[in-house]
Image (tube, rainbow, N blue to C red):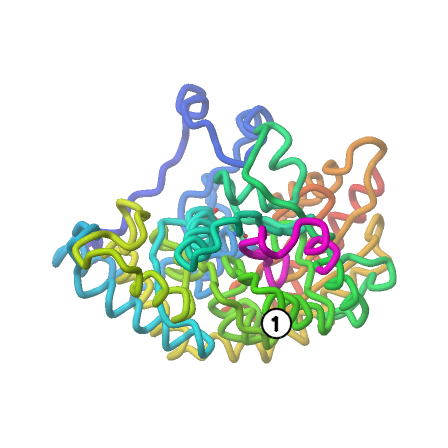
Amino acid sequence: MPRKPWEKQAMSTLTQRQLDSWWMPYTANREFKKNPRIITQAKGAYFTDDRGRKIFDGLSGLWTCGLGHGNAKISEAIYQQSQELDYAPGFQYGHPMAFKFAERLVDFMPTGLKHVFFTGSGSEAADTSLKMARAYWRAKGISSKTKFIGRIKGYHGVNFGGFSVGGIGANRAMYGQGIDADHLNHTQLDENLFSRGQPSSGAHLAEQLLELITLHDASNIAAVIIEPLSGSAGVIPPPKGYLQRISQICREHNILLIFDEVITAFGRMGAKTGAEAFDVVPDMMNIAKQMTNGAVPMGAVVTSSDIYQTFMDSPSKDYLIELPHGYTYSGHPLACAAGMATLDLLEQEQAIERVASLSPSFENTLHQLKGMPYVTDIRNFGFAGALTLESAPNEPALRPFLVAMRCWEKGFYVRYGADTLQLGLPFISTEQEIDDVINAIGESLQEIALT
Ligand SMILES: Cc1ncc(COP(=O)(O)O)c(C=O)c1O
């Protein structure tokens, strides 16, 4: 059969020069280049590596590819769009796909989120939402409201705003001064260890926001930014009632609430969004990753009408730009095509319902790892799960790395970060595949305990 345009020959070997030429992101380059793990193909829930091995994709890429890789409908949509309109400027000119996709996204969002500002990634969405929040208050005549409140262990990407509101020390330590931000504590409490789903205690931690308001004064605070479920820090679901209380405090003190749903939107929680799963609607929602099933980079900030309308009602002339902000690739036609196909597939394949119905079985299997060597906590929600491992002396990140490497050798890709191992299963995973990846983690834990 002739190859389709998007079907490419797999690469086989790489030279040391090629390996050295790519300074890889969020990678221990020195280790990787001694022991490269090269993915050459992907189909469904599986990668193929350069040794021809099939590897189960236990993190859906990077929380991106829940519908599986190489989906023919998404590939076809991208190809057709590239033939019809590969690129069009989004500054002062527009193309139909961006408007149509924005409308579909508004329909997908919880009631109240009505306008989509496209970006190229989750990090760009984070910084866009922060800039929008400051500009919103300035447009309202309260230009003192510039400070942001994030959370310890929060992750909002790597750009200057995002890392400043982020709360993972390693991501900030090298980069010096960021923008003006303070942080709420995280919600990981000892009494919640091994909780299934949302932990029952911890709602009181939302009251810390009142302390920060006392400290900084609401007249200086633009927004609170929160991942409804912290993903990158190792899947930390919100305690019951916590997000509701944060939202209430924000409303009472005239502070915008931004949900960073770069991981949680589009099905991973067994609901359309984290906002839907946890029943709290923010003023702005940041999205990316699963938005195009990972096939083309894209992100967005979806805002309330109040925010959008504040800019549209500004007293300046109609031909002047209301928000001087945007990216060359905002609303890229190929990303819009991939996103439309992704929304179609989420619906047609009932993928979100599938996550909701299989997540209790994922939860049960994952929690069977309790009692395995080094496992000090297990957390889960929807198709996201994580383990915390007891640190090796002075090396908190070593054991997760060793386990992940063993899993890779056994044919399973799982993410490791700091003292955690993380799973973000493809939505198309079968019960057997769920058992297999969790067994592989269990075996790997036992093996490293013996070495
Ligand atoms: C919650 C959250 N926000 C932002 C980002 C950054 O997204 P990107 O890597 O697309 O810039 C991530 C990435 O993992 C994320 O999990």
Point 33% across, 61% down: residue: 311
Categorize mark 1 by other alpha carbons within 10 Å: few (<14), some (14-19), many (20+): few
Q: Nearer the viewer, residue 440 or 84?
A: 84
Give the vertical position of 425 relative to 6 (above or below).
below
Give the vertical position of 232 relative to 280 (above or below).
above
Give the quadrant of the N terminus: bottom left
Q: Which residue is mark 1?
A: 431
Q: Nearer the viewer, residue 309 or 75?
A: 309
Compared across the picture, whether 255 is left or right of 211 comes to left
On the question of residue 444 being in view, the answer is yes
Point 16% across, 55% down: residue: 319
- Residue 222 colored magenta? yes
Q: Position of residue 436 (x, y in %)?
A: 65, 61
- Residue 370 colored magenta? no
* Amino acid at dot 1: Glu
Point 71% across, 48% down: residue: 420
On the question of residue 47 being in view, the answer is no
Q: Residue 367 appears in which quarter of the rendering?
A: bottom right
> In this picture, which residue range is highlighted in magenta?
210-230
Instruction: Identify the residue at the far top of this view.
Output: 17
Compared across the picture, whether 247 is left or right of 353 comes to right
Point 33% across, 64% down: residue: 339
